[in-house]
Image (cartoon, rainbow, N blue to C red):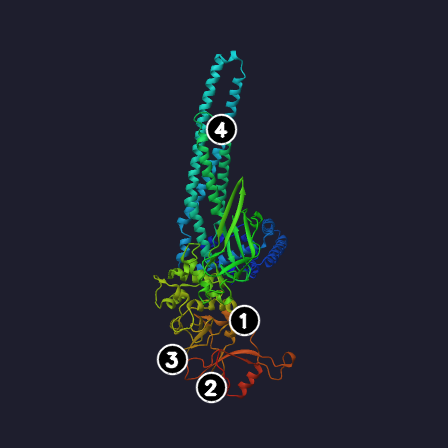
Amino acid sequence: MAQWNQVQQLEIKFLEQVDQFYDDNFPMEIRHLLAQWIENQDWEAASNNETMATILLQNLLIQLDEQLGRVSKEKNLLLIHNLKRIRKVLQGKFHGNPMHVAVVISNCLREERRILATANMPVQGPLEKSLQSSSVSERQRNVEHKVAAIKNSVQMTEHDTKYLEDLQDEFDYRYKTIQTMDQGDKNSALMSQEVLTLQEMLNSLDFKRKEALGKMAQIVNETDLLTSSMLLEELQDWKRRQQIACIGGPLHNGLDQLQNCFTLLAESLFQLRRQLEKLEEQSTKMTYDGDPIPMQRTHLLERVTFLIYNLFKNSFVVERQPCMPTHPQRPMILKTLIQFTVKLRNVSTLSNRRFVLCGTHVKAMSLEESSNGSLSVEFRHLQPKEMKSSAGNKGNEGPHVVTEELHSIAFEAQICLYGLTIDLETSSLPVVMISNVSQLPNAWASIIWYNLSTSDSQNLVFFNNPPPASLSQLLEVVSWQFSSYVGRGLNSDQLGMLAEKLTAQSSYNDGHLTWAKFCKEHLPGKSFTFWTWLEAILDLIKKHILPLWIDGYIMGFVSKEKERLLLKDKTTGTFLLRFSESHLGGITFTWVDRSENGEVRFHSVEPYNKGRLSALPFADILRDYKVIMAENIPENPLKYLYPDIPKDKAFSKHYTSQPCEVSRPTERGDKGYVPSVFIPISTIRNDCAEPQSPSDLLPMSPSVYAVLRENLSPTTIETAMQSPYPAE
């Protein structure tokens, strides 16, 4: 089933989550109308490839034009109007930055997959629950309310400043009028009344100056309190959500709302600064004993300027963390001599390895880099290069040492606004530098463990003593790897099996797991670690069995003991698909049958790895698989996918070809050759409960196989199939 069709079948509480991340950047109307086309494009790759993103944006607009042509014939006026508006908005927003539309669509598709995975989970994970707590939402609303209140207060002091200016102009006019009066007029009763009026005006002016300065001081105090507590706490929460999103968690929305709050506060502070300057001008024109402006303005101006500096320094963030275009789902891992991109809005190391960044180091922050009016800059072609040690020391080259070294990329900027020059600096989250792609799996494990375990964005010595991780949170992150990378997360049964594998316990509600147990120590009786085993499965799914995994037909993580419990009472020919626990990147199937005396028997085929699956698609293997039992003709034992789904009903849409008809030797294929196909065959002897030579893919023409069946006994065929060479 297409992803969008699955989304539309979700419960209302999940549909509300979907509604939150579709906006003018990527309207839901387009997602709905172009669902299949959108899902068939590689937006993740395009998000780090400008040429590819440009082509996809052009094709998106072409698809919209075709939809416009279709609805025009149907005379659907409302839809025609909306599509024209959407097309204009998309072209205007993303024409200068096509990679941004790829990022937006990629994030939306990924978030859909995460929500679909969450919907299949019995309960929400502890990490995701903490990120979406009601207290966090309440604080966000409080921040927005307080920012709006400060903005209104500044508007009121703007009126006060203007009133003071008008009052002072009137006082100045009356005072100058008295000065021009004749000496005789100055002694008149009219003159006495005018002086009394001036004194009242001066008293009122003094009161209003003090009142205005008091209001301004109150605004400064409220802004200081808001930025130093709630707003910075919101920013830290966003940075934490970004960390979690980088390792597959929920999309880290909220930056636009934060930007809006920072922008409104900055505008208010600059407006307040101008008001203080106007008060200084007024005081220069007219001052008096006890004038509050000279006594208070300087201190207030210093505080306002400090708040502006502080606001800008905290608002300078890495919006999109460093990422290689070749591995868009593995951010914060950089390979030497491979370009990467990083985007800033609004390299120092602690190891004996040093790197320089090749490429354009200096760029101007521009509104054109963003679709939402923020000052931003994107570096798309930076390339790390390792510097040779002067002592000739290549550093630590152990399999885990390099991937446990954390590095930080520092960025600096300078902004000039209204006479203020503000120097800004920020750093990326810790990255891992690798020199060989074989180091990528362990490097990604380091990124996962770091961002799961700490909210400290600059602890470069973290792996000197890595803390244990909560097992429940770790399993939640493991599920995210599947939902974000291969489109379907893990359910509670699958996570339970992984927990047992990690802890050899039947419950994982409590407890913690060490870094060594996760990534460095071999599994009992195996030559590989838990993470290496899991990463190989992810790679297998992504490259060879992705559609079957997304459809939910692969149980995957189930122990042999649980497998037999599930199958023992099922109809003969019922089978399930699970990942091998003994082979890296292997998938096998087990089916149940019964002997003549009713004894339940289980048969598991030797796991198929990526080498075998490159030769023959897995769905075709399930369709064409044959077993030769002693004294019986070959037959396919796979009838029903667990629990009771007819095999062809589950997999027929994934078959890549029709079953080959058996041909005679006289029938010729292309270029005079007899047509040949791969046929997956296993043999089972009476005294053997498992296939004797499982999953051998024998290159054999249908015609030859037909002749063998006609002229040779099953025993002879079985003997001929015994290979003198060891299996892979």
Q: Earlier in the sequence, mark 4 or mark 2?
A: 4
Name the secondary structure under disc 4: helix
* Type of amino acid under label 1: Tyr
In this rendering, does residue 257 appear at all?
A: no
Name the secondary structure under disc 3: loop
Residue 179, position as x, y percentages in the image: 52, 18
* Type of amino acid under label 4: Ser
Q: CA distance from mark 1 to mark 2?
A: 30 Å
Whether the residues at callouts 1 and 2 have beta carbons within 8 Å, the answer is no
Name the secondary structure under disc 1: loop
Task: Characterize the local packing of mark 3: few (<14), some (14-19) or many (20 or more) Cα atoms within 10 angstroms.
Answer: few
Which residue bears the numbered disc 3?
A: 599
Q: CA distance from mark 1 to mark 4?
A: 85 Å
Left or right of 108? Residue 526 is left
Q: Earlier in the sequence, mark 3 or mark 2?
A: 3
Which residue bears the numbered disc 1?
A: 655
Whether the residues at callouts 3 and 4 have beta carbons within 8 Å, the answer is no
* Type of amino acid under label 2: Glu
Which residue bears the numbered disc 4?
A: 283
Name the residue at 49% across, 12% down: 188
As drawn, 342 above or below 654: above
